[in-house]
Image (cartoon, coloured by chain):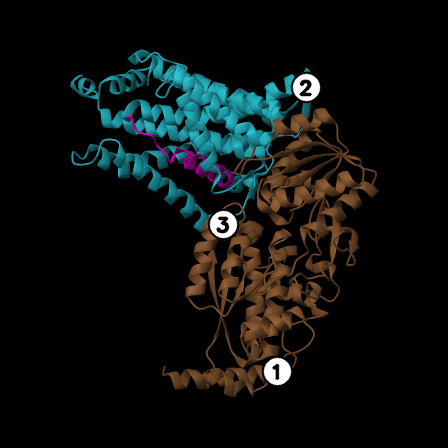
Chain colours: A brown, B cyan
Amino acid sequence: MTKKAVGLVLSAALLISACTSGGPVATGTAAPSTAPASAAATTAPPIKVGFVGVQSGDFAEFGKETLQGTQLALEDWNAKGGPAGRQLEIQVEDDRFDPNQAVIVTQKLIDAHVDVFIGAGASSTIIPSSLLLEGAHIVNIHAGSNPIITDRGLKYNFRASPRDDVLQPYAADWAFRQGWKTVAMLHDKTALGEGQAIQFKAAFEKLGGTVLLYEGTTSGDTDFSGVLTKVKGLNPAFLYCGCNAPQSGNIVRQAKQLGAAPQYLITDSGPTFDQVAGDARTDVYTINNLGPADIPGNEDWIARYSARWNGEKPSAFTVVYYAMSDVLFYAIDQTGGTDPEKLADFLHGLKGYKSVFGTITFDQKGDNVAAEIGIFKIPASGYPYTVAERRNDVVKP
Amino acid sequence: MDFALVPQYVVNAVTLGSFYALLAIGYTMVYGIVKMINIAHGDLHMLGAFAGFGAVGLVSALLLPGPAVLIWAVVVAMLACAVVGMFIEAAIYRPIRTDRRSSTTAGPLIAAIGVSYVLQNGAAVIWGPNRNAFPPLLPSNRFEIAGAQVGVTQLVVVALAPLAMLVLYLVVQRTRLGRAMRASSADPAVARLMGIDVERVILITFGIAGAMAGLAGVLVAVYYGSFYVFMGLVAGFKAFTGAVLGGIGSVVGAMLGGYLLGGLEVLGTAIFPAEWKDVFAFIALILLLTVRPTGIVRDASASARV
């Protein structure tokens, strides 16, 4: 097929999608572009989206969910002509949850001249990767929760998910309000897990709670009976797990077998946790941003997600990735291109954007200050989890 | 350290040690006979978990009682891993080992690293990187023994591991095959002169090692309730350490080394913060090896070695 023919087919496709009114995207403001979509698409080059996530190892499940969220957002935008009338192209790289690898693949994407960047996969990989992107003036958006990321005064860096120093003090406050005054804490020694645990510990102690044990686990371990026996001996009101989902699953399962603690609060949950914990998942509490099903009006989106991805249910991470990809494409559409200065200014001033993840409002740091968070109680089976409490007014203490 | 918790720590250590010991045996048997570290052994136990899971799925429609399904899963996993282990030996290690031009140690070792990567990442492509839940085949009842919580699955693991090791020990010490294995290990050239088909003995050794890995894989999956494609990495490394600790090449040593490593880890957790567990266990390993470079079982005579 010649280039011209491709262009013709593309414009035809765009015309058709333009005619089918509404479009599949559930998110508020439909996107009118400045130029007629069909004309722009024939000449405008595609927009290159760089995506770095965890595609292998312990967090691979999480990485797969996040990529699926982003891909669906991308397909939704492409189906209605693409932001500013340009089609989106994605290049995916694996950071293996390894900061060194994240630097390598981020540089690779910068060298490939990506226009915008989604990722990296977790706080420990975002921290180095975002510095490279800042230097290259590429707008990047992520769901890292470690406060450091946006506290460094980066201009092109945006965080869609809540900060740990908002989430964890809130969780500590909630636990304290339940009358749980003593805690044994485990973390997985990653920037994510330990970062969360540090925030929780500080807030819990400030409230007057006692931290009886505060220890790290080893990556790749499945047997936690030793440390859990120690926890049992300390008799805490609850066990806190700042660990990745598979570890939390193993820990809770073994802890319940030992009778290590009466209550459990974990930071990372979802399908992997449910699989590994099995029956032990029942009545475990978890803290997170709201899941897709907790935000009203998401039914269509959830159904569409399942239809696209072999009947899988979207998780609380998927929904953030969809929303943050969507808001990034929206910004491209509104500013009429991928100029990083315009994009960054637009996003910094964005207020009250309605997404499947709730409202998105970025402050000068690039934090989403409207992120809605909650404490969830995990039921004996199924998903979503039961909301124990939800808030969207929690600010950094 | 809270002394009221000592019984629980002992139970923990024995359980963990059982897994290490079962895997350590495979490392030590292979090393004993071909002086090669089969890095891919840990990944065989991952395959065992998947084979066991598949076996459970096959009979799920029959609604058999849990213990019967477990035995079936163990048998299938042991057979599957024995076959895979023998295939790897015959198709990959043997040609490299027997080629006069190849380096005697580095070639097979690098090949083994390659096999390990292929197994892990091949499995990841086929089954995906996610954790899979293993169905609970045994009742979840728990007993309190001397203040320690012990589950039914735990009892089975703790009993089955030494039983398997005992059978293996008897095979090595009391059978014609065992004698051929010991002879091939002591001096392959002389063993050949005595009419022993050394290559066949090596093949069988890989088969037995694989079967033990398969058993360990199913037991790990049943006990922890989940399994995934990268589970062999850390477990294999720890078990290999256990084998060295016990005196690599010795079956008895591998058992002792596995239990000792389990004990050291649990002791490390009991005394120090959990993040120091491995540091403690491996400092102990280094100290022990500086004093006894051959590991616990020092006897290098053919009778004690496979």
Q: Nearer the viewer, mark 3 or mark 1?
A: 3
Q: Amino acid at mark 1?
A: Thr
C-alpha separation, residue under disc 3 versus residue under disc 2: 39 Å
Q: Amino acid at mark 2?
A: Asp
Residue of label 2: B2
Same-chain status of marks 3 and 1: yes
**Residue interval drawn in magenta:** B35-54
Tell me where residue A179 appears, x and y as whole percent.
Answer: 83, 38
Viewport quadrant of the N terminus of chain A: bottom left
Residue B182 covered by magenta stretch: no
Residue of label 3: A99
Q: Nearer the viewer, mark 3 or mark 2?
A: 3
Q: In the shown orientation, is residue A311 left or right of residue B48?
A: right
Mostly what secondary structure, the magenta segment? Answer: helix
The residue positioned 52% from the left and 30% from the top of the image is B219
Tell me where residue A389 appears, x and y as whole percent.
Answer: 79, 51
In this rendered view, identify the residue nearer to me: A112 or A231.
A112
Chain ID for label 2? B
Q: Secondary structure at mark 2?
A: loop
Residue of label 1: A20
The residue positioned 45% from the left and 86% from the top of the image is A8
Marks 3 and 1, the one that precedes in the sequence = 1
Q: Amino acid at mark 3?
A: Pro
Q: Is the Cβ of the residue at disc 3 closer than 8 Å to that at disc 2?
A: no
Can residue B168 be spotted in the picture?
no
The residue positioned 72% from the left and 26% from the top of the image is A234
